Image (cartoon, coloured by chain):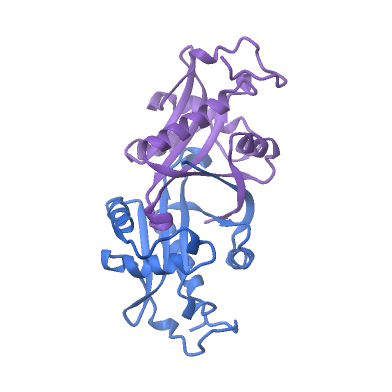
Chain colours: A purple, B blue
């Protein structure tokens, strides 16, 4: 109820109270992939017309107890997604940390507070798993996303390095 | 043999050929923690005088087939460490990615090419695990580390956001 914002394109009637964040199921794969692809960067990387590699990956994710792939559901429709990984480690006195990847909100719901709800879910789940640090990387070009994460309490204290293996 | 460099403090006789990168064992925990603590940032975060939380964390890491905590060993001595996590995912056509954390080289061996050998091991292991992307974050203050990763082919394409949970 308090998660709606005044951002452009926000449907004022967004029923945030009816939103559920739940574990993704195999039948959610098409909706998740559609959200991954409906994005400036994702459009060049995803192939929603060929779901086979995604279905195989879903099985790998679902079989690993440290992976938490979730969808945000409103009225039976998956309108957001996030992938949380719980990682044990030695550093910081044997701390467990959490990694957030693949956060997406359906175009119709952007600016509605749904992204905040997904991150709040990830933080709460991380605490349940005794994680002491939540981390994520965001492409340097996603300036709006950076502001979003800073508003939620994240600090851009690090550089994120990537190397594709081809 | 080709990994020695002219950096200050490099022992010219560093026997890089005798270096082995192998899975860490419980008895390596004190040496790994000493390396984590012998670092500008780690000094404030680690407690090498109390190993109990590290030993408990080691058991969690060792029990998870997606965690690869390794040491670099020369003449029976652990002189480097790295933690690689293999993460299945839906994005990028169901890609598996790798995350590198907690890279450390013993003070005596810094500038010897040992860090390069550790990263090369992580890249090779990532390929074996069919990972298509290797990623890591580096504190914004670690300017030398940034140059090191860029020389190895990483791109600082992202911002790394962190939030401690207290």
Residue at position x 50%, y 28% in the image: A32
Total marks in image: 0
Q: Is residue B52 left or right of residue A57?
A: left
Residue A49 in view here: no
Please state if A121 lies on the left or on the right of B158 as rendered: left
Q: Is residue A160 above or below residue B6?
A: above
Q: Quadrant of residue B52?
A: bottom left
Residue A133 location in percent, x, y? Answer: 47, 45
The single residue placed furthest to the bottom in the displayed view is B13
Q: Furthest residue to the front? A: B49
Q: Looking at the image, is B103 positioned above or below residue A94?
A: below
Q: Is residue B78 left or right of residue B89?
A: left
Q: Position of residue A162 (x, y in %)?
A: 57, 54
Residue B12 x, y percent position in the rendering: 51, 89
Front in this rendered view, residue A66 or A61: A66
In the displayed structure image, the side of residue B5 where residue A140 appears, left or right: right
* Residue toward you, A119 or B35: B35
**Which residue is at the far right?**
A8
């Amino acid at each position: 109820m308090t998660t709606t914002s005044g951002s452009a394109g926000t449907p004022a009637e967004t029923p945030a109270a009816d939103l559920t964040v739940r574990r993704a199921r195999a039948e959610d794969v098409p909706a998740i992939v559609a959200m991954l692809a409906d994005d400036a960067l994702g459009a060049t990387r995803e192939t929603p017309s060929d779901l086979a590699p995604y279905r195989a990956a879903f099985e790998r994710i679902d079989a690993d107890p440290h992976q938490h792939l979730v969808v945000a559901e409103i009225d039976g429709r998956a309108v957001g997604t996030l992938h949380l990984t719980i990682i044990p480690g030695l550093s910081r006195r044997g701390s467990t940390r959490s990694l957030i990847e693949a956060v997406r909100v359906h175009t119709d719901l952007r600016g509605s507070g749904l992204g905040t709800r997904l991150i709040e879910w990830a933080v709460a789940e991380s605490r349940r798993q005794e994680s002491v640090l939540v981390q994520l990387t965001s492409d340097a070009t996603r300036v709006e996303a950076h502001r979003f994460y800073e508003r939620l309490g994240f600090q851009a204290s690090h550089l994120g390095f990537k190397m594709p293996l081809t």
